[in-house]
Image (cartoon, helix red, strand yellow):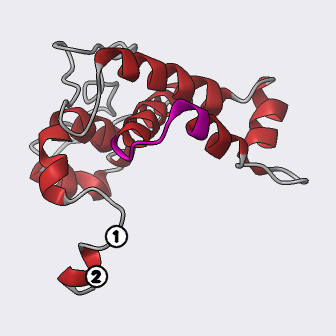
Amino acid sequence: MALFIWKQLPVPRPDDLSQHTRFLTPRTLELVYTTWSMQPLAQDLGDTGAPFTWNEDRRAQLRAELDAYFFHLYGVSREDTDYILESFQTENGGLKNNEIAKYGEYRTKRLVLTEYDRMAAAGLSMENPLVDGENCTSTLTPPPGHGPRHPERDT
């Protein structure tokens, strides 16, 4: 894709996102580094540990934090965020209906909107990133990027 086309897209530029990597990287790393085959990526991101274990509840919270963060960065209002989340359904399933059947609630919507509100209260914007331990604290214990890992493998 040519640079002039990229600059016309309604997405944050990499330079604009650079100040947000302290928040985004540990969450993304923990979501994608769940197998040894992803170790080169983890090492490129400065992680030298074993892959993270797959914990569905923890992963849902990590995704909710990332989703809410990007809704803020794109300037999507809470009302529109709610509307967008409601659109993830079909007559025969979709995220909303599948989660209601599985959890008795639309868990993703609850988690994302809860995080959206927490981030709004902390003043998240493109110019004001969230920094764990400074102007925000994740509800996850241990914090993002420090979740449970697989045992180290023998080399």
**Horizontal side, residue 75 vs residue 152: left or right:** right
Residue 152 appears in the rendering: no
Q: Secondary structure at mark 2?
A: helix
Estimate how packed mark 1 is, as few (under 14), some (14 to 19) or many (20 or more) residues with alpha carbons within 10 Å. Answer: few
Which quadrant of the figure contains the N terminus? bottom left
- Name the foreground residue: 66 vs 101: 66
Q: What's the CA distance linking mark 1 and mark 2?
A: 7 Å
Residue type at tag 2: Ile
Q: Residue at x 27, y 56 (%)?
A: 12
Q: Residue at x 16, y 50 (%)?
A: 16
- Name the foreground residue: 137 vs 35: 137
- Which stretch appears magenta? 73-80
Return the x and y of residue 137 as percentages of the image width and height: 29, 13
- Name the foreground residue: 129 vs 106: 129
Query: Magenta segment: does it hold 76?
Result: yes
Residue 30 appears in the rendering: yes
Return the x and y of residue 133 as percentages of the image width and height: 18, 13
Q: Which of the 4 image quadrants contains residue 5?
A: bottom left
**Horizontal side, residue 18 vs residue 62: left or right:** left
Residue type at tag 1: Leu
Q: Are marks 1 and 2 in contact (CB under 8 Å)?
A: yes
Q: Residue at x 76, y 50 (%)?
A: 94
Estimate how packed mark 2 is, as few (under 14), some (14 to 19) or many (20 or more) residues with alpha carbons within 10 Å. Answer: few
Residue 130, placed above or below residue 71: above
Query: Magenta segment: does it hold 64?
Result: no
Q: Mark 1 = which residue?
A: 9
**Horizontal side, residue 12 vs residue 18: left or right:** right
Q: Which of the 4 image quadrants contains residue 131?
A: top left
Q: Residue at x 81, y 41 (%)?
A: 97
Residue 147, placed above or below residue 122: below
Q: Which mark is residue 5?
A: 2
